[in-house]
Each structure stands twice: as C-alpha cells, then as structure tokens.
Image (tube, helix red, strand yellow):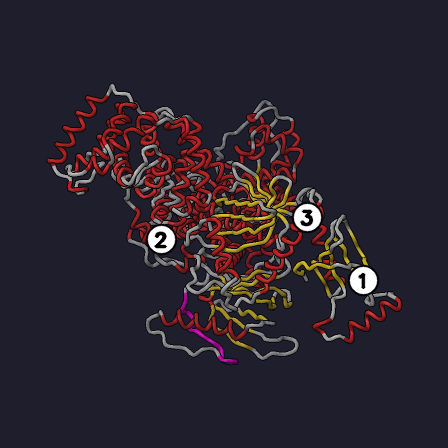
C-alpha cells in the first residue's frame, strides 16, 4: 500500500536492499524470505511476538536522492507481489520524469506530492458507494468552482490526481472533468498552473505511450497540445474523457445534445464520493453498447446483466454467457463470440417458471413464448428478481387490454401465464396494419412489396439451375427455422451468418431484413404510427418535400416498379413520412435510392421502419445536412487502408480517390455503383453485420485492384479502374430479370474486365479482413468524429467570415477572432442558460451565418467587454438600445453579421456615422416607447436638439469635446433640473461621444484574444 511519505533516518538497519535505482530502494525486512542468519532470526522472532498493530510490513519502498542522507518511506507491502506492483508503477511512471529535474529538493517535493495524490485518489475509490461522504466529493466540487470560477450549474463528473506536462517539466496536480470543461490545477514549488479547456474545442483525444511520456493522455485543441500522465487508473480516466468529448461533439452537431444534458441527475442531497454523474455516464455507455449489440430501439434502458448458461437444443449444450434485462427485452450473448445470440421480447412471453434446482442444473428458469419456443436458463444468481420483473411486465401489459382479468404473480413453482393470442404478431409475415387510412388501404403497396406486384410470377422450376439454387436456399432457411426458431426469438449463431453470406432467398428477404435490423421491434410496438404520419405529412409544403419531389424520378428509374405512378407514390409517402418524423434529418440525397430498394421487398410500413433503423441506428448521422456519419466512416476507411493496405494507402491519398469513392459507396450501400442484383446481396449482409461489412467489402475491392491503382497517374484513371471493376460484379444466382445498370459504363479500347462473382467477393472480404471488430470500429468512430466535426466547424467559420468580410472594416484575422468569441458566448448560454432556449433555437438547416444567434443579455455581456462605448452606469441601457437597433427582423436575436455590423460602426465609423448611431439610439426601435416616459413631445425635442448637435459639430476635432466636457462639470450637475430627454443627451454626449471619436481598432485584436481566453477561463464563467 502507498504510504504518506515519512522520514527514515537509518535505511539499512534491519532491512536488506533487493532492488535500487537512482531515486528509489526496494527493501525486504530481515528474517523474511530466505537467509538472514542470526540477525534475521532475531528480527523475525521480534516481529512475531509483537501484536498486530506494532508489526512491520516485510517489504517497503524508500525514496532518496543521490546527495541526501534522508530517506522517505513511500510504500509498503505484505507480499512480494504487492510491493513489486508498486515498484513497477514507480519505474514506469516516475523514473524517467524525475531525471528531468535539476534540483534534488524539487525531486523530493514532486515525489511527495505525487504519492499524496495517489493516496487521496485511492481513498476516494475505496469509499463504499452507499456511504454518504459529506466532505470528499463535495469538497472537490467546491474547490473546482472556486479555483476556476465555475457557476453552480456546471457539474463536476470526477477528479483525478495526475501530472500535466508544461514543456519538459511535469506539474503534479488535480484534473477536474466537468460536463463541459476539462480543468487542471497545480501549485508546486511556488508555481501555479491553471488550465481550462472546453470539450467543444477538443480536436483529438488519444491515449499513448512515448519515450518522454510513459503512459499519457494527449488532448489536442486548435491552439495547443496538452499531455497528462501518471494516472492511478488511466483507462478509467480516458474512457470518461471520451464520453464527455463525445457529448460535446453531439452538441456541435445537433442542438438536441444540449437538451440531453437535462437527463443528467441533479442530486438534492450531498454528492457521494462516487459521482452520480459518472455513474450516469457509465450507464449511458452500457445502454448504448447493449442497444447496438442487439439492435434494440433507442429508448431501451438496461436494467442489469448476470452470468448464466443457456440450453441450446440445436447442439444439446449449456452455453455459458450473460443475460441482459431491460424494460422490454431479455437478451443473451454467449462468452464465445458468435456461438449464440438471443433476443426475447417480453411482449412474446407467455410462461415464466422456476424449475427445481439440482447439482446438474442449479437455479434453472424456463421462459416460453407465443411462438411455442421454450428457453432454459440456469446458474442464475438473481432468479427471483428476474421472475418478478417479467411478472410485473406481463401484468402491466395485460391490464392495458380491455376485459383482461388480473393474474397472480409468479411463485416459486407456479408459472406466470398469459392467454394465447393476446399479444402482438409474432413474425413479420403476419402483420397488416388495420389502422391504415382509406387511401393507404386502397394502395397495393400497403400490403405487398413492389417486387411481388411488378415481377411476373413464375415457378422456380421453370428457371433452370437458378431456380433450383433458389429452391435450395429456401429449403436451407426452412431447416434453419425448424432447428433455431423463426421470428425475433431465433437463436442467432455462426450458422445464421453462413446462410446470410450464401444469399437470402427473395421470398424471405423482407422478413429477415426486418428481424436483423431490429426494425420489426419498433413496427409492432407502434401500430398505426406510419399511417398517422402519412396523413399528417401529405400536402404539407416544406424544403424536404420539394427535394423529395425533385428526386422521385431519379430513384432506380431502370426498374419497372418506379416507371409508373404506383411505385412513385409509395416512395413519396415513405420519404415524406420520415421527413415529417425526423425534421433534423428531413431528406438527404441517397435516401431515395435506399428506400426504393426497401420498397421492393417490403410494404410501405415495413420500408418506413427499415429506413428508421438505417438512418437512426445502423448509419448514425449519415443522412443529415452535412453527412457527418459518412465522413466519419470515410476517415475510418482511410485509417484501415493504412493498416491493411499500406502500399496502396499513400497512393490513394495522393490521388484523392478515397474521399470521392467512399461517400457514394457508403451512403447508398453500393446500390448506385454496382448492378442491382449484386448490391442487394451486400444489403443482406449489411443488415446482419452492420457497417463492418461495408468496410470489409471496400477494402477487398481496393485489394483486388491494387496493382492497377498503383499504376494510375491521376484521380480520373483510378476512378475508371474502380468503376469498371464494380460494373462487372455479378450475381449469377439471381432469379430476378436483369435490371439495366445505369451507372456510367467506363470503357476503353481494352478488353472488358472479367466478371467478379459477388459471393466470391464477400468470401474474400471475410478471409482477408475478418479481424475487424465492432468495438474497434466504434472506437475509431469516436476519434474520427472529433476530427470531422471540428473540421466542419472551421469550414463554417471561414464561410461566415468570407460572406461578410467585404462589407466590414475588420481584417480576416479580427473577424475570425470575433466569430470565436461570439460562438463561445452562444455555447455558454447553452451550457448554463436557465431555460435552454439557446439550444432549442439553433436550426441546423439554416445557413452557417444564421446558426449561432445571441439574445439581448448575451449581447450586453459582449458589449461591456468588447466595445469602446461601454462606460458609466448607463452602459446596460446603451447596450439594450444598440441590440434593438441591430435586430433587423425583430425576433429578439441577432446573428454574427448583425453583431459585427454594430462593432464595425463603433470602431471604424467616421465622426458623422457615429453621431448618427447615437441619434438612432434615441429613436425607436433603439428606444422603447415605455422607456423613461418617452412621448411625442420628447421625440420632437430630441429631434431638434440632436440635429443641431450634428449640424454644428461635424467639423469639430475630438479635443474640443474634451474641453467642452471639462467646462460642463459633473454628470449630476449637467442633468440637474433638465427634462428627461436633455438628461439623456447630456449623459451620452458627456461620457460616450468623447470615447467614440477617440476609438481606434488597433487594440481590438488584443481585446478579443483576451476576451476569448476569458470565455475559456474563469472570468466569463462568473457572468
């Protein structure tokens, strides 16, 4: 265990040194271990006879510098394993760092501070979660607020002892991770270090090990690189930092990210030593992983998980794994990857029964479903809780049905049962929404996929070898259904994936897409939802509706299903309904192509829910206005190319091909670049495997064309090579009539390339690139998301600055600084605004210039800190009037252009322009009619007086105003006994006009940089 450093005057008395380095000694007490002689025997005897409180640990670590005779005990251990662990930590984390110091006193001070920090963190983590700690965490939170000037609404998540590297010297201190900021404070050797970084400014976050930094976390912003090391638990710290940075990126991408922060708990009692916020973030991460693993709806929350075994009838084995329980599902995942996955919706459950325990089958639990399947779990630790959980759900759902009687809860042996036929449909083939509106009921696409309606019915017997192959596929799947079950409760194993890779028969494609994507769960739990959306959205005018109408006839025009009004109308309804459901996405090009294919194999409602699964869960952020998700996966593709195809990676970067090809491949799932019959096989595998499959196939395509790509001289030639290859990927097993492929056939005088079988391509992708794991892809997505979103923010900044630079007197550099200050003020209001209206009012569909807008209170704060007219007690009134003057559309918000226009007038306007602005501030809309008893008489007096001032003073030098002010006396004397409008004029002229005429913008950049720093540090945080 680590010890609070204690001075040891004699180091070698009764101790033997076993290991040493320039700064530390590892010693063993004589009499312990082998040898020791008579002295060791006496010491050992003494240690034995002493009571436990006086006994000395047999191992210890001392700190000593070369020229010092004083030793410091920093750790002790009861076993060699324990002390060796501490010794290795010191060698790996401190040894190299200490060699940098020149002063030995500094070395000792640093070591003592580091050990104290480790002990404090260990005590924090060892505190039982159920014990209230009135001091520890609360004290750290109060210290954080005081140290960095944070308001009370800024919530501390956790804090860690670590070192921040400032140059080559480490600064030992405390790292505070709040919801919106990363903060560090150190006071060592008389030097103070204070650091505050907003999570939205982080561009890169990495955990790595270098020669200088043994094991550290690197945090990059646009301006600097920060290194933190010597954590007691670096993995926990890094994981939390990832979560917080990810939330910040979501806030930049989507204003709903700020609103999600409301769900963070706000404890009314003193916080415990384990942060409630950290526990909540950990729970969020587990929920996301759980939903992604089993493709569950976004609102599903994990209640808990437990180890157990599952009896699998197809191989007569008890498979070890974990059971996961949530609001509406029981799921199982085997410990051996792909051995077995199982999803049991609680709506399907009819009987839950606790069987008798035995030595062979301890704590068994049997669950039966409406599809006549029974699942046997065993080795359950929380069997009673699980039975109670399912019982409560069954009673709750039964009570909602009219006429349903109450049922008894499950006992130890009595089953919980519900009548057959009282729940929702079991398989997709049995669904037909009874609540469709009249026009939908008349549409054939309400109950059938377009392929059935437009494909001539012909028996597989008349299709020759292709028909026989299709028949064999159907038979293989029927056998699989018999052995593994059919519907949502199917056992999903490696055998299932094998069948998917061999191709899904067309008669089962729609059903299996719904099951594997998880869309079936949402469809059966939201009956009538699609019909309701169609009814609400039809006829509504919107930007999305216009874009949809424009692209309808570009959606698979080569297919007969979309060469007539029926197919086009079905596509219009599905796309319009989704745009109405999710206005954040609305409509994006490529959605029409994907939706067209979904409509071929499913009815409108099924296609709609498949589109929901695709856009909101399987391809997150792909189809928003900035296609962020596709850009993120493009970055992953580039990273994987460097890893798996290093020879080709550099060439592809030089040609700039990856950014061109990946968007079209990923956004349309290869449907726009491959023949339809081949691309639909990739869609089959995608719904089962997810994005991993798309990345694998993309790598396999590059690998197959490596030699030709390496010989390409430009981007056009490389695109020709890949285009010719993809045009010739064929599906020789397809029973559908061939559909002309309208992708540009890129040909040259050479012979056409050989045909590539789609199933061979898939096989190759698994053989060469199957090492890709979903967890690794999610980790890479986080890393790339930081880069992509920050790059988009930089692009937005440049676009805004270019759009207004010609009309404003500021330089490009000054405008960029002003933009960052303006944006930071907006974000601050999102963090700490009382009603969060700032987050709600941001519309991602607006031009960049309109996305960040501030209200009157935010403008007043910027006015005080940036403008030259801020002086005296009337500054708030002046700021309010200026805001109303700049607010052209009277929505009580101003954008960046309006803000900069006002700033430019104050800094760059000539004498006449500044006087005109002051004059306008005394007229509506600058002045309110209710303000200071404003009346028509006052207006006339102001008009008369101000016009005289303007006419008589246009040629006056600013020094004459100074002399006039000096001769007029104080503001109180000037305004005494005057009407309100003359008071106002005197006050403004006396204390503002002089500053207006002397204003120079030479110091503005310095002011803005200082203000931008304050927005990130404590000065602004107290506003």
As drawn, the label of residue 13 is 1
- Quadrant location of residue 698? top right
Q: At 59% from the left edge and 28% from the top edge, which residue is drawn?
A: 654
Label 3 sits on a secondary structure element that is: helix
Q: Nearer the viewer, residue 45 or 217?
A: 45
Considering only order in the chain, which callout, 2 or 3, is on the residue closer to the N terminus? 3
Name the residue carrying label 3.
105
Residue 19 within the magenta-colored segment of the rendering: no
Q: At 54% from the left edge and 48% from the top edge, which residue is drawn?
A: 184
- Quadrant location of residue 759? top right
As drawn, the label of residue 377 is none
Whether 941 is drawn above or below 124: the answer is above
Cα–Cα span, label 2 and label 1: 83 Å
- For residue 378, side relative to residue 250 (left or right): right
Magenta-colored span:
411-423
Name the residue carrying label 2.
530
Q: Position of residue 837 (x, y in %)?
A: 33, 48
Q: Residues within 10 Å of mark 1 (few under 14, many from 20)?
A: few
Regarding residue 379, the answer to whether it shows in the image is yes
Q: Residues within 10 Å of mark 3 (few under 14, many from 20)?
A: few
Considering only order in the chain, which callout, 1 or 3, is on the residue closer to the N terminus? 1
């Amino acid at each position: 265990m680590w010890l609070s450093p204690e001075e040891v005057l004699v180091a070698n008395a009764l101790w033997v040194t076993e290991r040493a380095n320039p700064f530390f000694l590892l010693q063993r007490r004589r009499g312990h271990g082998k040898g020791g002689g008579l002295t060791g025997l006496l010491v050992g005897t003494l240690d034995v006879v002493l009571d436990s409180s006086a006994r000395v640990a047999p191992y210890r670590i001392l700190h000593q510098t070369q020229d010092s005779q004083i030793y410091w005990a920093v750790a002790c251990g009861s076993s060699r394993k324990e002390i060796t662990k501490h010794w290795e930590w010191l060698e790996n984390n401190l040894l190299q760092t200490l060699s940098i110091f020149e002063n030995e006193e500094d070395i000792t001070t640093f070591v003592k501070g580091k050990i104290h920090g480790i002990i404090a963190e260990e005590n924090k983590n060892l505190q039982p979660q159920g014990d209230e700690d009135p001091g520890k965490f609360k004290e750290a939170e109060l210290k954080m607020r005081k140290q960095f000037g944070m308001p009370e609404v800024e919530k501390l998540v956790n804090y860690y002892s670590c070192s921040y590297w400032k140059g080559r010297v480490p600064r030992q201190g405390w790292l505070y991770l709040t919801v919106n900021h990363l903060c560090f404070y150190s006071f060592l050797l008389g030097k103070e270090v204070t650091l505050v970084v907003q999570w939205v400014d982080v561009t890169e976050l990495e955990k790595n090990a270098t020669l200088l930094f043994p094991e550290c976390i690197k945090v990059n912003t646009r301006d600097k690189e920060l290194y933190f090391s010597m954590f007691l638990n670096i993995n926990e710290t890094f994981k939390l930092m990832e979560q917080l940075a990810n939330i910040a990126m979501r806030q930049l991408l989507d204003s709903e990210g700020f609103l999600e922060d409301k769900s963070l708990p706000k404890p009314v009692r003193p916080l415990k030593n384990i942060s409630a916020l950290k526990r909540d973030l950990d729970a969020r991460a587990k929920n996301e992983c759980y939903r992604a693993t089993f493709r569950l709806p976004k609102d599903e929350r994990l209640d808990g998980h437990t180890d157990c075994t599952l009896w699998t009838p197809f191989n007569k084995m008890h498979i070890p794994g974990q059971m996961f329980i949530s609001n509406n599902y029981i799921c199982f995942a085997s410990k051996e990857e792909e051995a077995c996955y199982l999803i049991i919706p609680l709506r399907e459950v009819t009987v839950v029964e606790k069987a008798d325990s035995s030595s062979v089958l301890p704590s068994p639990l049997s669950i039966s479903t409406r599809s006549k399947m029974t699942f046997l779990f065993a080795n359950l630790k929380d069997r009673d809780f699980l039975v109670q959980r399912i019982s409560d759900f069954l009673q709750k759902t039964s009570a909602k049905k009219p006429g349903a009687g109450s049922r008894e809860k499950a006992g130890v042996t009595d089953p919980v049962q519900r009548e057959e036929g009282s729940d929702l449909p079991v398989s997709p083939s049995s669904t037909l929404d009874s609540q469709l509106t009249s026009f939908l009921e008349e549409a054939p696409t309400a109950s059938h996929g377009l392929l059935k309606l437009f494909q001539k019915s012909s028996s597989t017997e008349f299709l020759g070898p292709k028909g026989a192959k299709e028949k064999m596929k159907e038979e293989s799947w029927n056998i699989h259904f018999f052995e593994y079950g059919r519907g949502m409760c199917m056992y999903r194993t490696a055998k299932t994936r094998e069948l998917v890779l061999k191709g899904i028969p067309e008669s089962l494609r729609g059903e299996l897409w719904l099951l594997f994507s998880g869309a079936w769960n949402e469809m059966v739990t939201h009956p009538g939802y699609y019909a309701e959306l169609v009814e609400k959205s039809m006829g509504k005018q919107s930007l999305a509706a216009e874009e949809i109408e424009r692209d309808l006839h570009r959606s698979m025009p080569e297919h007969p299903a979309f060469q007539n009004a029926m197919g086009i109308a079905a596509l219009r309804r599905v796309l319009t309904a989704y745009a109405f459901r999710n206005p954040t996405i609305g409509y994006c090009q490529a959605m029409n192509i994907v939706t067209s294919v979904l409509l071929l194999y499913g009815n409108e409602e099924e296609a709609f829910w498949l589109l929901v699964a695709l856009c909101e869960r399987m391809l997150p952020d792909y189809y928003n206005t900035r296609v962020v998700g596709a850009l993120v996966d493009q970055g992953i593709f580039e990273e994987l190319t460097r890893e798996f195809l290093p020879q080709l990676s550099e060439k592809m970067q030089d040609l700039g091909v990856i950014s061109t090809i990946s968007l079209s491949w990923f956004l349309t799932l290869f449907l726009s670049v491959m023949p339809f019959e081949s691309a639909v096989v990739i869609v089959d595998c995608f719904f089962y495997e997810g994005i991993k499959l798309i990345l694998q196939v993309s790598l396999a395509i590059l690998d197959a064309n490596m030699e030709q790509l390496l010989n390409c001289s430009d981007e056009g030639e490389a695109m020709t090579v890949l285009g010719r290859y993809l045009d010739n990927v064929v599906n020789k097993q397809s029973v559908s009539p061939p559909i002309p492929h309208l992708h540009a056939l890129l040909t040259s005088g050479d012979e056409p390339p050989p045909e590539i079988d789609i199933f061979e391509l898939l096989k190759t992708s698994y053989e060469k690139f199957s090492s890709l794991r979903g967890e690794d892809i999610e980790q890479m997505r986080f890393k790339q998301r930081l880069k992509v979103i920050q790059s988009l923010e930089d692009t937005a900044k440049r676009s805004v600055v270019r759009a207004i630079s010609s009309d404003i007197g500021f330089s490009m550099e000054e405008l960029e600084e002003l933009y960052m200050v303006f944006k930071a003020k907006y974000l601050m209001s999102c963090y700490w605004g009382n009603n969060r209206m700032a987050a709600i009012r941001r519309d991602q569909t607006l031009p960049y210039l309109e996305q960040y807008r501030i209200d009157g209170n935010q403008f007043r704060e910027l006015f005080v800190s940036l403008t030259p007219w801020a002086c005296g007690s009337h500054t708030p009134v002046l700021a309010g009037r200026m805001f109303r003057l700049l607010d052209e559309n009277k929505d009580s918000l101003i954008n960046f252009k309006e803000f900069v226009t006002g700033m430019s007038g104050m800094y760059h306007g000539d004498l006449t322009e500044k006087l005109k602005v002051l004059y306008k501030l005394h007229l509506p809309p600058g002045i309110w009619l209710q303000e200071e008893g404003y009346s028509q008489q006052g207006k006339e007096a102001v008009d008369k007086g101000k016009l005289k001032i303007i006419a008589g003073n246009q040629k006056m030098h600013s020094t004459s105003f100074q002399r006039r002010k000096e001769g007029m006396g104080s503001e109180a004397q000037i305004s005494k006994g005057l009407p309100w409008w003359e008071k106002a004029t005197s006050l403004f002229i006396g204390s503002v006009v002089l500053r207006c005429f002397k204003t120079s913008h030479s110091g503005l950049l310095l002011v803005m940089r200082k203000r931008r720093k304050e927005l990130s540090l404590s000065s602004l945080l107290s506003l």
